[in-house]
Image (spheres, rainbow, N blue to C red):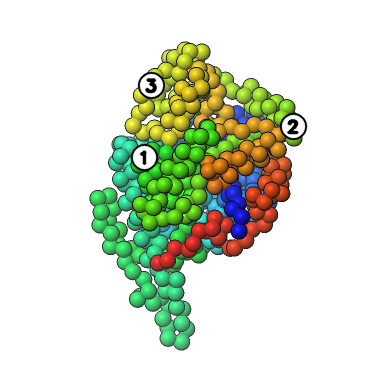
Amino acid sequence: MTRQMHLGLFLLGTGSHVAGWRMPGAVDSFQDFAAIREIARTAERGCFDLIFIGDNLYADPAAHPSYTLRLEPLTLLAALAPLTRHIGLGATVSTTYSDPFTVARAFASLDHISGGRAAWNAVTTASPATAANFGTVHPDHARRYERAGEFLDVVAGLWDGWADDAVVADRESGLYIDPARLRALDHDGPFFTVKGPLNIGRSPQGRPVVLQAGGSEAGQDLAARTADVVFSVVQDLDEARAAYASLKGRLAAHGRRPEEVTVLPGVMPVVGRTEREAFDTLAMLQGFVGNENALALLSDRLGQDMSAYDLDGPVPDITLPDSYHSFARVMLSKARRDGMTLRDLYNLTAAARGHWVLCGSAETVADTLQHWFETGAADGFNVMPPYFHDGFTNFVDLVVPRLQERGLFRRDYTGTTLRDRLGLARPSR
């Protein structure tokens, strides 16, 4: 079968652009469930593989609106599950500020509720501000990834604690659960002691799909060992190819094949029926951004206050804090490569929070995505609309049909689970 790309939707209710909510008629609240339901149905109409909802665990009124004001992701996806039929449902839950038993149980539950469409985005949480809401001190980068590695192993072990046929429910004998087909985990490690098994049977996918987005060396190593889908942060084709090859090259050391991990770079597409229409839309979006908002986002992404620097001078030679890796590294690399000013950099940050912005006609956008897909930069894309609904429906109605006509993307869903859509085998117990 001809290789086809995968598409995820990164769902921020007010759009990925920091000022997307200011567009005429745009969705202006990530608490508007009716709007979110419509977005999910549009994604399913476009045959997207999955919806992905990120999360953060603290409130900052100066940050992106959908970071601060939002519904809890797992609750939201459980509500969307019966309103959709095919699309995968992915949510972020932190390995630093959660426990493995609760996470394993919650995603197994979502997998049952959705009929095999659940996905967990396992993150270590970069922002130190989170710790204040949990009465603790934010661990350093190395410690967070040590914990995350053990956390993922425990969750996988808990998901594997039930055989597929453990529930017997034999009315004549009275045997409901065969204890021989359950196994305790009995994990005792540096961070967690967990007996197991879960109090929920094996999920339809065997294990829910695991998503990750870490860009540091530790993050890439963890992804190569444990992830099914990796979201990458890129700004440049050659950089994307190098990152793609690097991750795929790490898999063999863990006994895995390249096709077992799907790499989806994040992209904010600004799509028009013509080039002019697309660039006018981007100009309108950028016109809504004030220096204060953009600098707040840039300071957040770089982990330090950038307001003291000359906006029209070169990007300063700064040292990144331990907590900040993928986004900051990509942004600073691009700024230095392209000779950007700090104003250029914060405009880029405001546009898509550090992600790749692709602006143009539907034909141009489709051509560019095809080129990246066919030249070793991606297995598909994590689409980050600048605003809803038009900023997304333009992609679904104008770009997706072009990809389908070229045989690059499905015209209908096949299989029953998210693993089926991604071409991933069901894990054996």
**Numbered tag placed on residue 274 in the rendering:** 2
Identity, as a three-letter code, of the amino acid under mark 3: Ile
Identity, as a three-letter code, of the amino acid under mark 1: Glu
Find residue 228 and report its horizontal and vertical position in percent: 46, 52
Label 3 or label 2, whichever comes before in sequence order: 2
Label 2 or label 1, whichever comes before in sequence order: 1
Q: Which residue lies at the image location 44% right of the left edge and 63% below the top edge? A: 427
Find residue 179 and report its horizontal and vertical position in percent: 35, 75
Q: Does residue 305 lie above or below 206 as drawn?
A: above
- Give the secondary structure at mark 2: loop
Q: CA gap, disc 2 to disc 1?
A: 41 Å
Find residue 373 and report its horizontal and vertical position in percent: 58, 44
Label 1 or label 3, whichever comes before in sequence order: 1
Identity, as a three-letter code, of the amino acid under mark 2: Thr
Tell me where residue 160 sits by quadrant. Answer: bottom left
- Which residue is under mark 3? 318
**Is 152 displayed left or right of 341 in the figure?**
left
Q: Which residue lies at the image location 38% right of the left edge and 42% below the top edge? A: 219
- Residue nearest the viewer, comparing 373 with 292: 373
Q: Which residue lies at the image location 25% right of the left edge and 54% below the top edge? A: 189
Tell me where residue 15 sits by quadrant. Answer: top right
